[in-house]
Amino acid sequence: MKQVLRKSLGGEGVESLPASGRGYAHVCPKCGQALTLHDLRDGDQAYWCHACNVGHRASDPPARAFRPLPQAG
């Protein structure tokens, strides 16, 4: 079940994120490759795609950053 958390800045409607990360892979919204988790200097964490050189803070993921796992559960 998806839970609506925030409105999209692009005016495309509403971005929805899964209520839980269980059963989802955290992937790059651009290329779909797995992301690596890094600690930031300010104490937060961020996910980074080394292929695209883009990332996002763990506390603010884009909706396209989650892909359902083939066999969850």
Image (tube, rainbow, N blue to C red):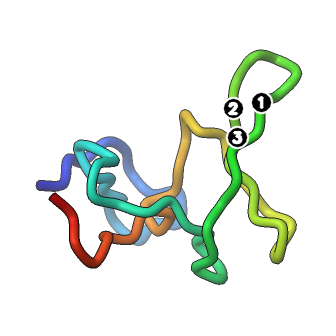
Label 1 SS = strand
> Between marks 3 and 1, how big is the CA–CA gap?
6 Å
Contact, CB < 8 Å: mark 3 with mark 2? Answer: yes
Q: Give the left or right position of residue 35, taking residue 49 as reference.
A: left
Viewer-proximal residue among 29 and 23: 23
- Residue at the limit of the structure toward the left, as seen here: 1
Q: Residue furthest top?
A: 43
Which residue position is annotated with label 2? 45
Q: Quadrant of residue 40?
A: top right
- The image position of residue 30, as x and y in percent, is 65, 79
* Cα separation between marks 2 and 1: 5 Å
How many neighbours does mark 1 have within 10 angstroms: few (below 14), some (14-19), or many (20 or more)?
A: few
Counting residues from the start of the chain, the first of labels 3 and 1 encountered is 1
Q: Crowding at label 2, few (<14), some or many (≥20) Cα neighbours within 10 Å?
A: some
- The numbered mark at residue 46 is 3
Q: Quadrant of residue 51?
A: bottom right
**In the depicted structure, whether residue 51 falls above or below residue 39:** below
Figure check: 56 above or below 67: above
* Dot 2 and dot 1 residues touching (CB under 8 Å): yes
> What residue is at 26 percent from the left and 43 percent from the top?
20
Q: Is residue 59 left or right of residue 8?
A: right
Where residue 39 is drawn, which disc sits there?
A: 1
* Tag 1: amino acid: Asp
Does residue 66 appear left or right of residue 48 in this picture?
left
- Where does the C terminus fall, quadrant-wise? bottom left
The residue at the point 51 percent across, 57 percent down is 62
The amino acid beneath tag 2 is Gln
Q: Nearer the viewer, residue 24 or 55?
A: 24
Task: Where is residue 26? Give x, y as percent.
Answer: 50, 59
Q: Nearer the viewer, residue 6 or 47?
A: 47
